[in-house]
């Protein structure tokens, strides 16, 4: 029972860290365009993070809980190693101001610890490969949708004064920021729901036929909202100003493009990176001005972090698992 409480505590801690690590995904555009103050933005985002499961259901949580590794081999020790590795990598990338993927951090840790415990056969590789594919697809889809929205709106707004366009999209950004925060809550908070669900099965509190308890859903959504309220200002700066300069028009296009991408993947139960999605959407909004408006050196550093996240957290989780077994034997 004590170990189960530790796992749940670590899982909710990861959700809080995920919230402030990825707060930039929801608020960077609306803060950088000065539509909302930082405090107003995190409150706005946290509210929509919290209510997201009421809108989208629990498709992503079920994928993580049942579709990445065989639940029957998972132990609480495996989950502790996976969560510890994920938390360590998230804190490192937050400290460096790198918008890496909390989703892939968690998945990498889960897969690495499971393989260390029971071997390579325990992983559902088709599902893992689908998630890995979306390292590329999520930002590309977000960027493409953002470009289409930007080009469409540019044509609609022809002949309208810049001042009126700016004023209109300042208001519309409230809606696009809310929509993106819904998508963020629907995708990211649910990954930890899946981990706690597996922990309850491993401890004998549930069976694989049971549904995810309501208290798990509410605690994960609340933890994500609390983390978002704490903000993640190092990464907000990277996302909101270092990739490209955003005006309310581009901010609305980026948020809407990212939100539509997350809506689709959440309904399909695909655990994608909200970080990758909004980064691609921001690049798409910047490209519509001109190619040179995007700081490509910054995006290169971000992409490198994306590529190494899964292997690094997998290896770290495996190492932590073996260390814990060694310490336990001593």
Image (cartoon, helix red, strand yellow):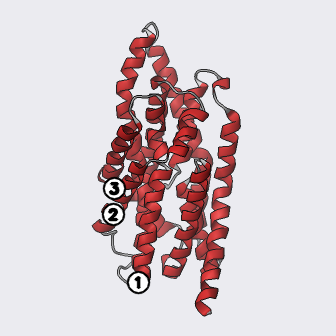
Residue 60 visible in image: no
What residue is disc 1 on?
2
What residue is disc 2 on?
219
Would residue 143 appear left or right of 214 to someone viewing this image?
Answer: right
Q: What label sits on residue 104 in the rendered view?
A: none
**Which badge, 3 or 2, comes first in the chain's sequence?**
3
Q: Position of residue 137 (x, y in %)?
A: 59, 45
Q: What label sits on residue 57 in the rendered view?
A: 3
Q: Residues within 10 Å of mark 2 (few under 14, many from 20)?
A: some
Which residue: 54% across, 64% down? 87
For this rendering, which residue is in front, 150 or 326?
A: 326
Which residue: 69% across, 44% down? 301
Disc 3 or disc 1, which is closer to the eye? Answer: 1
**Which badge, 2 or 1, comes first in the chain's sequence?**
1
Gap in angstroms between the C-alphas marked 3 and 2: 15 Å
Question: Compared with residue 203, is residue 281 higher up or lower down, i.e. above or below?
Answer: above
Q: Residues within 10 Å of mark 1 (few under 14, many from 20)?
A: few
Question: Compared with residue 174, is residue 160 higher up or lower down, i.e. above or below?
Answer: above
Q: Position of residue 199 (x, y in %)?
A: 43, 76
Which residue: 49% across, 49% down? 22
Gap in angstroms between the C-alphas marked 2 and 1: 18 Å
**Which badge, 3 or 1, comes first in the chain's sequence?**
1
Q: Quadrant of residue 211?
A: bottom left
């Amino acid at each position: 029972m004590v170990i189960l409480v530790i796992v749940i505590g670590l899982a909710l801690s990861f959700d809080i860290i995920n919230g402030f690590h990825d707060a930039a995904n929801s608020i960077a555009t609306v803060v950088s365009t000065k539509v909302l103050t930082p405090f107003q933005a995190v409150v706005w985002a946290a509210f929509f993070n919290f209510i997201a499961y009421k809108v989208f259901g629990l498709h992503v949580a079920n994928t993580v809980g049942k579709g990445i590794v065989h639940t029957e081999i998972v132990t609480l020790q495996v989950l502790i190693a996976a969560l510890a590795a994920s938390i360590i990598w998230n804190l490192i990338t937050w400290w460096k101001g790198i918008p890496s993927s909390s989703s892939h951090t968690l998945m990498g840790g889960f897969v690495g610890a499971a393989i260390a415990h029971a071997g390579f056969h325990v992983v559902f590789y088709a599902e893992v490969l689908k998630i890995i594919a979306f390292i590329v697809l999520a930002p590309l889809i977000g960027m493409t949708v953002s470009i289409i929205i930007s080009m469409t709106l540019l044509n609609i707004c022809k002949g309208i004064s810049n001042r009126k366009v700016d004023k209109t999209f300042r208001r519309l950004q409230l809606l696009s920021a809310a929509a993106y925060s819904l998508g963020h809550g629907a995708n990211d908070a649910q990954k930890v729901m899946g981990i706690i669900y597996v922990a309850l099965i491993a401890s004998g509190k549930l069976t694989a036929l049971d549904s995810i308890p309501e208290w798990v859903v509410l605690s994960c959504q609340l933890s994500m909202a609390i983390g978002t309220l704490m903000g993640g200002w190092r990464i907000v700066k990277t996302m909101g100003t270092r990739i490209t300069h955003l005006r309310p028009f581009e901010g609305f296009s980026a948020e809407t493009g990212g939100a539509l991408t997350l809506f689709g993947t959440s309904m399909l139960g695909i655990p994608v990176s909200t970080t990758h999605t909004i980064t691609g959407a921001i690049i798409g909004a910047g490209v519509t001005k001109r190619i040179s408006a995007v700081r490509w050196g910054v995006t290169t550093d971000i992409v490198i972090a994306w590529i190494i996240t899964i292997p690094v957290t997998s290896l770290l989780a495996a190492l932590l698992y073996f260390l814990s077994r060694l310490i336990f034997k001593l």
